[in-house]
Amino acid sequence: MHGKLTVAAFTKFCLIVMACFILFGGGKKSLAQSRCEFTLAWENYPPFIYLDEQQHLTGFDVEVAEQAFTLMGCDAKWLEMPWARALVNMENGHVMVLASANMTSERKAFSHYSIPYRVSRQSLFLREGSHHRCTSLTSCIGNENVIGIQRSYLYGAPFDDVIHDNDFRSNFTVTTSMTQSLKQLHSGRIDGLIGNIPVVWYLAEQVGVSSVLYQTKIKNTAGSEQHFMFSKKATRALDVVAFNAALKSLQVNGVLDALKRKYRVE
């Protein structure tokens, strides 16, 4: 007779998977190390990854990754770099893991993916005074508004199709970070931007533009599932299996939900 899998039984299963990972070796390990180590790239992306007032790296993604790797008996080493450069380094194996990643066929060519661990929602933001009584992305930017987008970012529907439409190419300007986009909006170089909703509001407060920023109703309401990416050149499928078991353990034991409440994310 088959019953429901209890929390205790599932936790035991996860521990067995992670024990196999440790037994057969995982992560990057030198002769002087007794624990495996994974290198992760990061850029300022609050409340998911950022430096606190004491200049300690923290955030939802940081806590999830470090707790998962701890369950695996591994350490996390964080390297700061822009997202576009991080993707290149993932492909060539110089970076092992990236958080907050959308799954695409192009990226799957050089990466393994974890199970999803949160949902990302993007929205179109405009500067107050710009035309914001619009009902679609095309009607908003069709008013000659210039919108900031980040290099190598994926925004989901309805944004990505319009961004890659040649008819609207002149309406978008590419920046290296959300902070740069917000500064350009503040200086009047752009009229709006597309970004993750909590990230935009968090950084807008830092830059000092939250009072002139208007969030339109145009967003990817369904959201997009976010994953951890593992470089195929620097990690193995077993690493991802063990990491998924650790993520599932955090989920089943309520740790993931507690962190979502702490950082007010989905």
Image: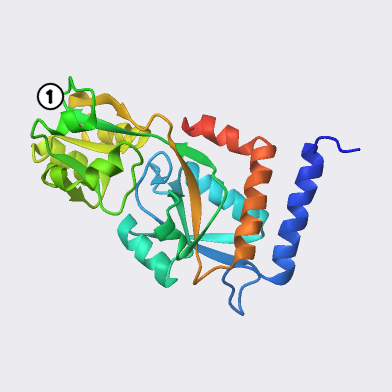
Is the residue marked by circle 1 packed among few (<14), some (14-19), or many (20+) residues within 10 Å?
A: some
- Report the amino acid beneath label 1: His
Farthest residue to the right: give it. Answer: 1
User: Which residue is nearer to you in this view: 154 or 180?
Assistant: 154
Which residue was labeled with disc 1? 131
User: Which residue is nearer to you in this view: 56 or 158?
Assistant: 158
User: Is residue 173 rendered to the left or right of residue 71?
Assistant: left
Give the residue displayed 31% in from the left and 36% down from the top.
158
User: Which residue is nearer to you in this view: 253 or 140?
Assistant: 140
Residue 49, placed above or below residue 30: above
Residue 7 drawn at (x, y percent): 77, 38
Residue 240 drawn at (x, y percent): 60, 59
Give the residue displayed 11% in from the left and 46% down from the top.
170
Residue 197, placed above or below residue 112: above
Q: Quadrant of the N terminus?
A: top right
User: Is residue 136 rendered to the left or right of residue 3?
Assistant: left
User: Is residue 70 rendered to the left or right of residue 16?
Assistant: left
Whether residue 82 is visible, yes or no, is no
Residue 190 drawn at (x, y percent): 12, 39
